Amino acid sequence: MDAHYKRLALLGFTPLQIEELKSIFPGAELIPVLRETIRKEISTADALVSADRAVLDEVLNADLLRKASKLRWIHATGAGIEHYLIPELVESSIVLTNGKILQGPGVSDHALALLLTLTRNLHLTISGDEDVATPRPIELRGKVAVVVGCGGIGMLIVEKLAAFGMKVFAVNNENLPYLTMLQKVYMPEQLLEILPKADVVICAAPLTSKSKGTFGAKEFAAMKDTAYFVNVSRGALVQTAALLEALQKGKFHGVGLDVTDPEPLPQDHPLHSFRNVVISPHLAGMSDNNFTRRYENIMLNIDRFIHDQPLINIVDKERGY
């Protein structure tokens, strides 16, 4: 198809971005749409490119897809796409792309920030609670870390943990290159084999129908009582009741959560009561550079789409990431 006939609906872009994209891609018809106008425009659009996750969450549903008879490509700006994978999209020929890999630097930084806050007792120092004895900080050098999920975020976590002198093992559903920073790769069904060796466990896996509830009573029981557990992926990967029960039994030197189930976590939730639990409000993906990377990724894919080239960051709709 000639580029002149490509019609792209742009959702959530600023006026300045729209003007820039129109100047860069004069051969395509770029139509800004709003949540109120998208159903009118979608029937003639070849692509729906979103820069606003919240609005796409609202409008992407079966009814919209039924109206989108020409649609060949949808872009979701974030990494998590589990709630978009409705049957009407999964079973269609529409290509779905997302922002995976792009948030790796910020989320991996945040994973280490949570871990170091706990291992160095920064949360206790900052709180100023002098009535409770502060445990001696631990150093990461020589300790064993297990990273569950080694995509664009997990591999950067591996890199940073290795730089601290840790022995790092991966749990991933695909094999990984034989990198010197990785001791060994385990498949998800082997998770219980490696957990007992871990001083640190960090979850960076995508949320899918298979990965939901990955960390439950059996997994927590398999970990050392002195382990540190960090989750920076999705709250539903962790069975909250099981985590709470493990903490109540004295498990873990520390737990760091950027995501929870439910989310946001109610202020009166029992997880807030533990001195060894640090919770941040799902902000690991934010950084001074992530919007720039997202926009560059969108521009690259628009260029590839209008020239009939393979897109990058394609989501496997069956696998869910």
Image (cartoon, grey):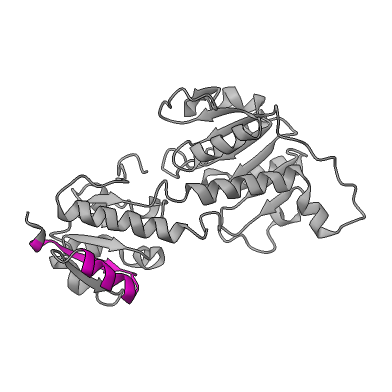
Looking at the picture, how far across and down is residue 153, in whole percent?
Answer: 49, 43
Looking at the picture, how far across and down is residue 24, in whole percent?
Answer: 22, 64
Residue 302, placed above or below residue 101: below
Q: Residue furthest right?
A: 131
Q: Which residues are magenta?
A: 4-24
Q: Quadrant of the C terminus?
A: top left
Q: How many marks?
A: 0
Looking at the picture, how far across and down is residue 239, in whole percent?
Answer: 58, 44
Q: Residue at x 65, y 40 (%)?
A: 229
Residue 83, placed above or below residue 55: above
Q: Residue at x 30, y 53 (%)?
A: 86
Q: Classify residue 109 as left or right of residue 115.
A: left
Decide whether residue 93 is among the magenta residues: no
Q: Nearer the viewer, residue 42 or 311?
A: 311
Q: Nearer the viewer, residue 288 or 233?
A: 288
Q: Residue furthest front?
A: 23
Q: Residue at x 60, y 46 (%)?
A: 111
The answer to whether residue 36 shows anywhere in this view is yes
Decide whether residue 12 is among the magenta residues: yes
The answer to whether residue 216 shows anywhere in this view is no
Looking at the picture, how far across and down is residue 251, in whole percent?
Answer: 74, 38
Q: Classify residue 242 as left or right of residue 173.
A: right
Residue 43, placed above or below residue 160: below
Q: Quadrant of the N terminus?
A: bottom left
